[in-house]
Image (cartoon, rainbow, N blue to C red):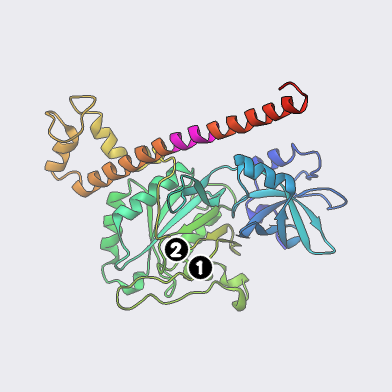
Amino acid sequence: MFTLQELGWCDFFRTRAAENPAVRLGHSGQSGRTLGTELVPARVAGSNRALYRILCEEGEFPAGPSGKLRHAAEAGSGLPAVGDWVLAQLRLGERRATIHRLLPRRGSFSRKTAGEKTEEQVVAANIDVLFLVTSLNRDFNLRRIERYLVLAWEGGARPVVVLNKADLCETAEAFRTEAESACMGVRVVLTSATRGDGIAEIRAILRGDDGSGTGCLTAAMVGSSGVGKSSLINVLVGDGLPRGERLKTQAVREGDERGRHTTSSRQLLPVPSGGVVIDTPGMRELQLWDAAKGMGRTFGDILELAARCRFRDCRHQSEPGCAVRAAVEATTLDAERVESFYKLDREEQFLAAKQDAALRAQRTRDLRRVMKSVNRFYRERGRY
């Protein structure tokens, strides 16, 4: 059993839930008794297609969306994702539930879906902190970390870079210094699930003890397969989770130190010491989605230099008075970081153009569908 506050409930969601007359909320934010058609706040802890696992004060329930919610999702509003707060009707006798409404999100970590479709995939919703996990082996890649940072800032979460498997690296502090120099003031934590390094620091972040938040925070762990996300979560929640329910883990391949896909779905787990953490499958492909603001936060140093260029439309190539190129030549700015910025900026512009084209095409389809309905209406009335 959990209280709503232990699951990440706050005034933002309480206010929006109270707008629905079928929901009863007490003065402390607790839900009322679940009688008749009353709805209770619940948090999505797992999903498999259109089947969900939700957590609320009455316990854990398998749940499905109502027909109205499905229809709204087909119209473009989307179905719930792990981390979302929903309003659900409980059938206590059956130990099942129906999700009737999706509460507005405070933010999300999203990416473009893999493949050719120009669609958003919400990896985790309503997160306060995003742990960007990489291991101190061949997986360590500053350019990939920058890509994660762009999406983290865009979704409204505070990123924390986690350098895991410090017990297997003799130069862990050197890696930390390198990461801090490329991450523009983002906190970097050295961890080891085996030895326990950094676990107390992560727990303090989840509780908001570092002054970055009030109450228990929600965090998601993202990164490639094999970096140790599930192992870290097992240490965080292990004291309150039966051994048979802990997340499965596998060793990386010895030949190339690549990870195997062990986590196959997203899961939300309350941490006994405070806070909520979401485990995500390893990501082999991470394409940007609506990341203009995140670019500014991640590459603020480059944008600040660009503002000092002699020409406003400077391309930072051969133009005279280019402050960016001068910084690279003076070795005060990493040339690979500049190239990473250009690459992500081109990707963002290309995706924005595709989104505009997809939106125009959808509007054309919608207009045609409406006109067909109008024509059918008049034909049936004998106008034609």
Which structural element holds mark 2? Answer: loop
Residue nearest the observer in this picture, 124 or 24: 124
In which quadrant will I find the N terminus? bottom right
**x, y percentage for residue 324?**
19, 36
- Kind of residue at badge 2: Gly
Sequence order check: which comes first, mark 2 or mark 1? Answer: 1
Which structural element holds mark 1? Answer: loop
Give the label on residue 282, or none: 2
**x, y percentage for residue 346?**
31, 40
Q: In the figure, is residue 233 to the left or right of 50? A: left
Bin the neighbour count of mark 1 within 10 Å (Cα to Cα): few under 14, some 14-19, many 20 and up: some
**x, y percentage for residue 118?**
46, 44
- Gap between marks 2 and 1 measured at Cα: 7 Å
- Kind of residue at badge 1: Thr
Q: Residue at x 13, y 30 (%)?
A: 319
Q: Which residues are magenta?
A: 355-363
Tell me, yes or no, if residue 3 can be seen here: no
Residue lying at the far top in this picture: please name it: 383
Whether 275 is drawn above or below 107: the answer is below
Marks 2/1 in contact by CB < 8 Å: the verdict is yes
Give the label on residue 237, or none: none
* Residue 92 lies in the magenta stretch: no
In which quadrant will I find the C terminus? top right
Q: Quadrant of residue 327?
A: top left
Residue under numbered circle 1? 263
Q: In the figure, is residue 301 to the left or right of 353? A: left
Bin the neighbour count of mark 2 within 10 Å (Cα to Cα): few under 14, some 14-19, many 20 and up: many
